[in-house]
Amino acid sequence: MSKEETAASTSTMKTALRFEEIVKRNKVEYHAGGSTQNSVKIAQWMLQKPHKVATFFGCIGKDDFGKILKKKAEEAHVDAHYYEQTEEPTGTCAACITGDNRSLVANLAAANCYKKEKHLDLDSNWELVEKAKVYYIAGFFLTVSPESILKVAKHASENNKIFCMNLSAPFISQFFKEPLMKVMPYVDILFGNETEAATFAKELGFETDDIAVIAHKTQNLPKENAKRQRLVVFTQGKDDTVATVGDKVTMFPVLDIDQNDIVDTNGAGDAFVGGFLFALVQEQSLEECIRAGHYAANVIIRRVGCTFPEKPDFH
């Protein structure tokens, strides 16, 4: 075993021990998480019924945390189909919250082990892909299986379905630019926040920090399916959400909230996408999609983690 592998193994063991200690010493709440899974959960929550409209693919370990994740996905009425493997344990992230402060301890583990040929390519799973009309994948997955993303993206493009993606984090544009740009021609709707948009623009040499200009330039990047004009949506926290509307760029004000009502902003971006997808699958207007996204994010930041009440009151 190399020094790097030994160090990685030791780090994983230490993280696992930290989780065990946290569970022993504290009252722990479990939630089915992960960026894409959060968005899928929110979309299903806002839809309410029918259940299992949203299908999710991911990778877990055959362990207790994997069992918890499956149970939580079931409770959220998400149709989760996990690739279960024994190389790595189920990915976990502990959020330790003290007053207004929070610390995150993440162990991606199984999340890095997804295998296209062992899961996505299986007839039973690919049939689920073929049944879908809208697809959403976070940019984080580019670090794991870009070939899986491309297979789904090309299917969507060839069948005039909607393929959505998220820039997810600045490091994706910085260090995974090549796989990102291979997928970009198939992206019908691109999400991101202001920091991710700025990094993306810098990496592509847009030579501007004007977010509206960045959105317009991103919209006009090469695209395979000419039947659908690319839509670009950039959130900016408490500031207006920026979106391309036809050939123009429009600002959409977010919902007002008292700063004292904000409990945890973790998952706000995921929630926005979930609300947006809820309206999108019902073929509502862009304005309604963004309004639903703003509503979902507003609910999430008032609670700990990406959690929500039993029923939405979105009208």
Image (tube, rainbow, N blue to C red):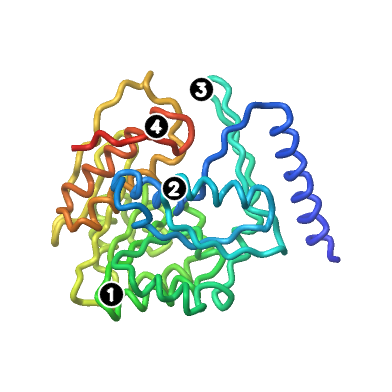
- Numbered label attached to residue 38: 2
Dot 1 corresponds to which residue?
223
Gap between marks 3 and 4 measured at Cα: 12 Å
In the displayed structure, does residue 42 sit left or right of residue 93?
left
Q: How far apart are marks 1 and 4 (CA)?
A: 35 Å
Label number found at residue 100: 3
Q: Which of marks 4 and 2 is in front?
A: 2
The circle drawn on residue 102 is none
Q: What residue lies at 43% left-to-right and 46% top-to-bottom?
A: 76
Mark 3: amino acid: Asp
Name the spot of residue 246 as percent of width and height, x first.
Answer: 13, 61
Specify which label sits upstream in the sequence, 1 or 3. 3
User: Would you name the residue on which mark 4 appears?
Assistant: 301
Secondary structure category for the residue under label 1? loop
Q: Which of marks 1 and 3 is in front?
A: 3
- Please tell me which of labels 1 and 4 falls first in the chain: 1
Looking at the picture, which amino acid does disc 4 mark? Ile
Q: If the image is split into quadrants, where does the N terminus sit?
A: bottom right
Residue 160: where, in percent of width, then height? 24, 75
Q: Distance between the residues labelled 4 and 2?
A: 13 Å
N-terminal-most mark, 3 or 4: 3
Q: Which is nearer the eye, 129 or 226?
A: 129
Residue visible at 50% across and 73% down?
Answer: 120
Judge depth for marks 1 and 2 and give the one in front: 2
- Report helix, strand or loop for mark 3: loop
**Which residue is drawn at the image coordinates 44% and 54% (left, top)?**
36
Spot occupied by residue 171 in the image (x, y as percentages of width and height): 51, 55
